[in-house]
Amino acid sequence: MRVVLALGGNALLHRGERPDAEPQRRNVVQAVASLAPLTRAHELVITHGNGPQVGVLAMESAADTSLSRPFPLDPLGAETQGLIGYWLAQGLGNALPGRRVIALLTQCVVDAADPAFGRPTKFVGPTYDEADARALAAERSWVVAPDGQKWRRVVASPEPRRVVEVEVVRLLVEAGVVVVCAGGGGVPVVETPLGLEGVEAVIDKDLTSALLAEALGADALLLLTDVDGVETDFGRPGSAVIRSTTPAEMRARSFPTGSMGPKVEAACRFVERTGGVASIGSLTDAAGVLAGMAGTRISAPTTG
Amino acid sequence: MRVVLALGGNALLHRGERPDAEPQRRNVVQAVASLAPLTRAHELVITHGNGPQVGVLAMESAADTSLSRPFPLDPLGAETQGLIGYWLAQGLGNALPGRRVIALLTQCVVDAADPAFGRPTKFVGPTYDEADARALAAERSWVVAPDGQKWRRVVASPEPRRVVEVEVVRLLVEAGVVVVCAGGGGVPVVETPLGLEGVEAVIDKDLTSALLAEALGADALLLLTDVDGVETDFGRPGSAVIRSTTPAEMRARSFPTGSMGPKVEAACRFVERTGGVASIGSLTDAAGVLAGMAGTRISAPTTG
């Protein structure tokens, strides 16, 4: 089977941990131990989030007085792909002696006319007092918004349209290489008359993973995180993990927009467009999730 | 022809420029304009330096109070590979419509017993007063040394032994993909019983490029920088660019250890080990340097 597997941010940084290098490297070693069995049996493409890491780099860049202005989000996202790609490729390579593993820098095209650019929703970077936030917004053409008691920059999260490097990913997967790519959803770029150009946005990594899985003709899409699966009524008494369902049943429910919502949307899209299977479950039992023994399995309804 | 082409740090950041994102992105667009003609005619692998970029990230990480300790050099180097790989891959992709371009995260094995670890020579990161430098050295097991009036951390620059991802590079080059890799000489790693592990060092990117060129069976190694070529007596009256020479002639001369020395050493090694041609010259005339019309061309002596 060809499997696209998306790792949540918690694969690298557990809740409450400081964003130091060492715990992240250690967590990666744990995470790949769960993935290694899959990699022996299947063609594997691994994608990953970058939220905490891009937040750290955005904050550091904003505080760097040697710069005239902080780095935009596209080079910062590229830095996190190098960072996390290094840890994952090294960890997987160590867990799979003799198997070739590579991390690729990945861009993802978004539409410059995407309505998301008109209503930015994703907080990025450090917090500010309102006055400072407004001053920075004026100086740097940022949009800022209140985040609790403080203010932060908000950026758009447009729809991923095309993974630029998909044909190279396909070539490598078909040659038996384990590919780490599409980190943070891919560096967001728009098409211009001069070619591709980075844009200040963030892309949902699960939606990009679904797009990538579709383009690669993958049989399965695994969205791995730190919960056992999708629950019927998250946080309420009597809530239970949904074991097996269809996109139509999932679309009839509602899920938290910030966390599980995009995962469910990504899984449904993949199943609807390809007839493949999408699963959402715990990183600690990747093999069980793929086998349908754990997690939430979403597949097309059986007909007839 | 198969060509490995190493870009000096000046390809991204011209002398005296601030390390902002925008000038670097603009400089990359200029640099790739010089490389695009080569790419149309030859198989091309592009490597690059990362000195100024890793310096910025090391300084930012050292100043980040959300961290218990600054990031080690291996993840910082990986970040610069993502950053510069993104700019180069995007710039080359735009300059070469229809051609596939990819940036790969690259590790380079060094020997844990390399004598360089006993005498670190490369300055990295911010400057400190002597007392602060010594305190940090004690706390973080750093070696520090005076750099002019201030003190800085110094790290080892061991010999590159093996580019971990070389077989993936070969596979892609043979499929017609332009590959950007080995940024900053590759992330330095050592072999341990548990596999590869990052190490606090920097690797000379020209030496790694020579090793990569040899492993790939390249016909030519181009080391491109901001000078016209190797001079007979750099900085002295009457000095002239050497046009065509042999490794033996070059080894009989002496060159500045910090800048031209490693380039000459890398070029000589490639020619001695492979019989190929190595050239050192200006990035602004890459095609002329490859054709032997510009720069310093080092090749095996004609026999007979």
Image: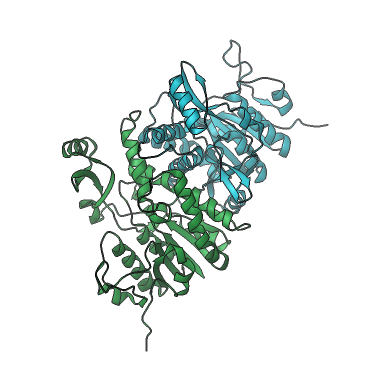
Chain colours: A green, B cyan
Name which quarter of the figure residue B90 lies in.
top left
Residue A61, percent across and down?
34, 36
| Vertical relation: B48 (above or below) A51 | above
Q: Position of residue A167 (x, y in %)?
A: 48, 58
Indicate the quadrant containing the C terminus of chain B: top left, top right, bottom left or bottom right.
Answer: top right
Q: In this view, does A230 lie above or below B40?
A: below
Estimate the x, y position of residue B112 in percent, counting from the top left. Answer: 64, 39
Write the residue at 29% across / 64% down: A261
- Residue with the most extreme top position: B237
Residue at image coords 20%, 52%: A118
Compared to residue B65, the image places residue B239 above or below, namely above
Residue A233 visible here: yes
Left or right placement of residue A260 versus residue B245 in this view: left
Which residue appears at 43% of the width and 48% of the height? A81
Is residue B123 toward the left or the right of residue A145 in the image?
right
Give the quarter of the figure containing the N terminus of chain B: top right
Q: Position of residue A125 (x, y in %)?
A: 29, 43
Residue sitting nearer the eye, A299 or B282: A299
Q: Pick the residue in front: B134 or B244.
A: B134
Does the image show residue A214? no
Quadrant for residue A47, please give it: bottom left
